[in-house]
Amino acid sequence: MNWIISAPAVAEGATSILNDNVVMFYVIHLAALICIVFSVSASMLVLAHVYGLRVPDPINRALGGIFTGGQQQQQTKANGGEFGLFAKRTDLSARFAVYLALADTTWGFSHSIDHLYLIVNGQNPSHAVAKVLGSVVWIFFGYHVLMHACLSLYTYLRVCKNTSVPFGAKDWKLHAACFGTVLVILPVLLAIQGIGNSGYWCLAQLGTPGGAFVFWLLAAVSGFTALATYESNRRVALKLSKSIVQLSGGIRQPSGAILLQPSSGMKVSQKSLPKLPSAMMGGTDSSPGGMPERSNPGNASGQVLSSTASADGGENSHQQHQHHSERSLVASKCLTTLVRTAFLLYVPLTLACSAIAVCFSFNIMEPMCGLFLVVVANLSGFMNARAYFINERRKAGRRARHGQKSSQSGSHL
């Protein structure tokens, strides 16, 4: 039994158990499907939390009890406020979680089809079927990667450059750009015979120069997304840290986060501080899933407060300053989580795509490289959901502490 898989092994109608290696056949396909189930389930939990749906109590307890069953949405509506992804005061940052969860979900479902086909059918698909399956995987994987890159770029422009990017009604320009790019490239890849049967899945055609080009292209795009995501979030965190120091002369903890200490007689111009996307400022007491602020017009969209803290400023001024300090600290920690998640997602994906591209350049497939790729490519939904819920627990903790302080303050009146 040969370990290395050559191009003839993926011929039309041949057995899908490549080189009669039954163990690797089931290991790779089952590993991919298990990762897909975890990612799709985690992404659906994100959507359930954003839309205020209830989940079983054991799951809610495992996630820190952050599911409230729509209580926050109902409270917002009862107070005459707007709720929804496209409410007037909602910016794109509040829809990050939804778009990433949808991208991870559609990618997972689309990629499960070719794995199930190869397992159930037991034979390699025809060239026509392989091109259809490969095209579907290409479209949703490309949309998935480009959505990550676009959201990172938006965050950088919004916070570091104070530039608002108009995406049109219901962000149609964003989705059109992501889907449009992969759809424009697809006919070119089909023309150079780049789409087809990869052996353990359908995407790039093994045994053609076009197939190798597809994986080199994916490696380049994944590498760019890794660098863009990491660098944009790093710069956002740096901008936030500098602004926090300007605001209160903070001290840096060993973990790299900023702990704010009020400075007497310090006045900070609002123009010198970044306009943070609302979903990164720790959410609000009435907005689930990172929905934006609706507290008062002077502090809408997570905008940093312009305040003067003086020695005789009074208790209210001190409490306001302390409240904003905590929100800024939560935002800094949330950004750190996003940076780490981007690193853990796209650096391994870039390495895996590069390894497969090298193999395809020699018209071969190495099974362990294939296993590495299916694991890192299909865990993205789980990793993104993990980062989301870590950040949401931080925001929920901040809201709970703020609520306790507000009630205590009220009891002294």
Image: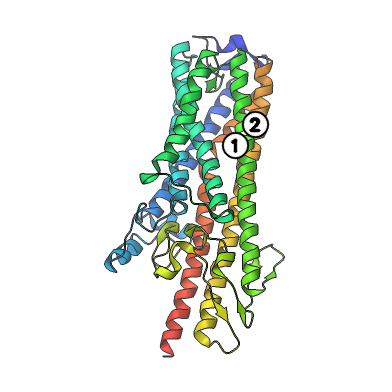
- How far across and down, in percent of the image, does residue 180 sit? 45, 30
Q: Are marks 1 and 2 in contact (CB under 8 Å)?
A: yes
Q: Quadrant of the N terminus?
A: top right
- How far across and down, in percent of the image, does residue 84 sit? 34, 54
Residue 126 visible, this orientation: no
Q: Amino acid at mark 2?
A: Ala
- How far across and down, in percent of the image, does residue 46 sit? 44, 50
Earlier-in-chain disc, 1 versus 2: 2
- Secondary structure state at the residue bearing disc 1: helix
In terms of image quadrants, where is residue 254? bottom right
Query: Which numbered circle lies on residue 352?
Result: 2
Given residues 296 and 114, the one toward you in this image is: 296
User: Left or right: 87 with respect to 338?
Assistant: left
Indicate whether 182 appears above or below 292.
above
What residue is shown at x 60% (from left), y 33% (from top)? 221
Given residues 146 and 312, the one toward you in this image is: 312
Which residue position is annotated with label 1?
376
**What is the crowding at mark 2: few (fewer than 14 residues within 10 Å), some, or many (at least 20)?**
many
Q: Quadrant of the C terminus?
A: bottom left
**What is the crowding at mark 1: few (fewer than 14 residues within 10 Å), some, or many (at least 20)?**
many
Query: Which numbered circle lies on residue 410?
Result: none
Indicate whether 76 appears above or below 55.
below
What residue is shown at x 46% (from left), y 78% (from top)? 404
- Secondary structure state at the residue bearing disc 2: helix
C-alpha span from label 1 to label 2:
8 Å
Residue 201 visible, this orientation: yes
User: Left or right: 222 with respect to 179?
Assistant: right
Q: Amino acid at mark 1?
A: Val
